Image (cartoon, rainbow, N blue to C red):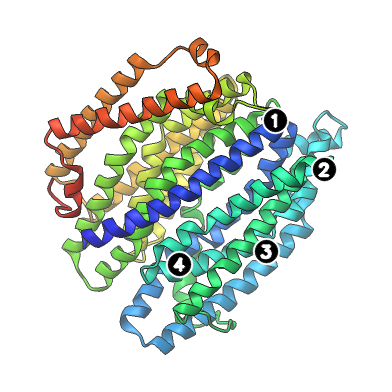
């Protein structure tokens, strides 16, 4: 079981690594083009709203509800019944998303006013940010159709994942990054408003992602004729699971939108600084957290369907240990190397040293929550695989309300950094509640061996952090170097940190590769 999970996890991580690297290249190009000024704020705003809805209709709530039901059909129903389910799901979801997309395009000014309240008020009163509101309304008309494309891309990816073809869906985001990079390099520089070119890159990228999946669906004989099926038993089950999950899975996205709303009242650059910090956070989160969660959801669903209680617990334990092994050092490394990473990646063109410093503050605040974000990705499937979406929703509501309270508490003294602090604290609460619920239900408990393993991870991470702190050059030293020298120094720090961490683990008796043969006891 665990060898197969390891193989799938490595495949997803490898494809995700390519995607994340291309994503970083995209952000480097955008930073060089627009920095963290008004144009960047508006583009990130217009890109964030359809991405929020993507988490509802695509990878988030829909996937968490669809994968367990599709797995059940593939295990217990005939191929014809499974194909019928796919047709009904495609037709039903497709019509709903089409309606939502049309509403979003037509009502873009309302969305811009709702989520960019500060800009809207300036527009009403002829304030300095009035142009941001008008531009955001226009750009939403271009970026919002991305929701339609990515919904079907995610549907295809979910189908392929249940059949063990994880690489396809993990690689697909590369095309979005290529499209945005292409438009940033060749279209935006010729436009009066370069951010509009980036918006068209989002549109084209979504289209290419959608088309890329089709040949693989044909290979799996999963490309079926869509039809309306609101009352089909499988669709009923999916939407019953999905409706509460719409909120539960997307708590972090709702929090980010609330952050955006508050940031629209703050100084110019706040949205951009939060964005660049979030992008660096998403790199390890996607590479490790989401990759691990992607492969364990189908596995957990099969264990639950086949009443394999011990196998279910072992799979959960494998996921938690993998997150601890990779997430703990990633979290501390991100915090300690915040400024050097931002310098190496973004400090050129329109992105200044001031932008580096401002973004680094939010990156440190976000970084403290990295392990919590990862744990949520692994613990939540422990509920969804058992068709329990209500419990995560309850916890999600608590976390979201707490985040809003924290926003009001921390945003006043710390500005945009306070928003990142609030997000990290609410993620910690959410992860704690998810584990507590699994523990009380007797579904998953941390074993003594896992607790000892966790302690060794903490010690190894502490040693790694001390080494990085001791050898980290001062800011003046970084500024005196060329771009290539900064890059070499950063790579050396990362490699030496990883080596220190691994050697310390080995001295403590931990053999990371044993996770594939001993999912419960190391």
Q: Decide which of 430, 306 is in the foreground and name it.
A: 306
Q: Earlier in the sequence, mark 4 or mark 2?
A: 4
* CA separation in Å, label 1 and label 2: 28 Å
Q: Up-down: is 436 above or below 245?
A: above
Q: Earlier in the sequence, mark 1 or mark 2?
A: 2
Q: Earlier in the sequence, mark 1 or mark 3?
A: 3
Residue carrying label 4: 158
* CA separation in Å, label 1 and label 4: 38 Å
Q: Which mark is residue 191?
A: 2
In the rendered image, residue 178, in percent from the top left (x then y), is placed at 61, 51
* CA separation in Å, label 3 and label 2: 30 Å
- The quarter of the picture where the C terminus appears is top left
User: Is residue 440 something one can see in this rendering?
Assistant: no
In the rendered image, residue 362, in percent from the top left (x then y), is placed at 53, 28
Front disc: 1 or 2: 2
In the rendered image, residue 206, in percent from the top left (x then y), is placed at 63, 59
SS class, disc 1: loop
Q: Residue at x 12, y 48 (%)?
A: 521
User: Is residue 520 something one can see in this rendering?
Assistant: yes
Q: Decide which of 177, 105 is in the foreground and name it.
A: 177
Left or right of 512: which side holds 293?
right
Residue carrying label 1: 265
Front disc: 4 or 2: 2
């Amino acid at each position: 079981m665990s060898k197969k999970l390891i193989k799938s996890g490595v495949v997803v991580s490898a494809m995700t690594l390519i995607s994340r690297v291309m994503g970083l290249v995209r952000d480097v190009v955008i930073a060089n083009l627009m920095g963290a000024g008004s144009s960047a704020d508006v583009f990130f705003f217009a890109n964030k709203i359809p991405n929020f809805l993507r988490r509802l209709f695509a990878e988030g709530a829909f996937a968490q509800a669809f994968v367990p039901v599709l797995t059940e059909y593939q295990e217990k129903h005939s191929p014809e019944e499974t194909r019928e389910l796919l047709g009904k799901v495609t037709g039903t979801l497709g019509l709903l998303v089409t309606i939502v997309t049309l509403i979003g395009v037509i009502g873009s000014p309302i969305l811009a006013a709702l989520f960019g309240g500060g800009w809207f008020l300036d527009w009403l009163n002829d304030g300095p940010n009035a142009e941001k509101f008008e531009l955001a309304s226009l750009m939403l008309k271009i970026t919002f159709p991305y929701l339609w494309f990515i919904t079907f891309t995610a549907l295809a990816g979910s189908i392929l994942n249940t059949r063990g073809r994880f690489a396809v869906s993990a690689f697909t985001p590369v095309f979005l990054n290529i499209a945005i990079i292409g438009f940033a390099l060749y279209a935006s520089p010729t436009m009066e408003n370069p951010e509009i070119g980036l918006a068209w890159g989002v549109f084209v990228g979504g289209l290419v992602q959608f088309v890329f999946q089709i040949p693989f669906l044909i290979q799996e004989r999963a490309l079926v004729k869509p039809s309306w099926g609101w009352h089909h038993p499988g669709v009923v089950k999916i939407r019953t699971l999905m409706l509460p999950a719409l909120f539960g899975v997307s708590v972090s996205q709702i929090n980010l939108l609330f952050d955006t709303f508050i940031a629209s009242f703050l100084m110019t650059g706040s949205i951009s600084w939060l964005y660049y910090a979030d992008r660096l956070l998403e790199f390890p989160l996607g590479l490790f957290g989401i990759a691990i969660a992607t492969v364990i959801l189908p596995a957990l669903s099969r264990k639950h369907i086949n009443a394999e209680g011990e196998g279910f617990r072992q799979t959960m334990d494998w996921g938690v240990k993998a997150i601890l092994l990779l997430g703990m050092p990633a979290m501390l490394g991100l915090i300690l190397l915040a400024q050097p990473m931002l310098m190496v990646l973004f400090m050129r063109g329109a992105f200044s040293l001031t932008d580096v410093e401002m973004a680094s503050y939010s990156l440190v605040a976000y970084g403290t929550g990295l392990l919590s974000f990862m744990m949520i990705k692994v613990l939540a499937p422990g509920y969804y695989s058992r068709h329990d979406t209500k419990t995560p929703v309850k916890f999600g509501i608590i976390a979201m309300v707490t985040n809003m309270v924290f926003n009001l508490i921390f945003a006043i003294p710390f500005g945009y950094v306070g928003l990142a602090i609030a997000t990290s604290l609410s993620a910690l609460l959410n992860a704690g509640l998810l584990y507590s619920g699994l523990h009380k239900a007797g579904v998953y408990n941390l074993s003594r061996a896992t607790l000892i393993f966790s302690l060794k991870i903490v010690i190894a991470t502490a040693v790694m952090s001390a080494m990085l702190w001791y050898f980290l050059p001062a800011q003046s030293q970084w500024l005196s170097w060329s771009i290539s020298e900064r890059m070499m120094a950063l790579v050396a720090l990362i490699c030496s940190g990883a080596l220190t961490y691994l050697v310390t683990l080995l001295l403590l008796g931990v053999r990371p590769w044993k996770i594939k043969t001993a999912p419960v006891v190391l």
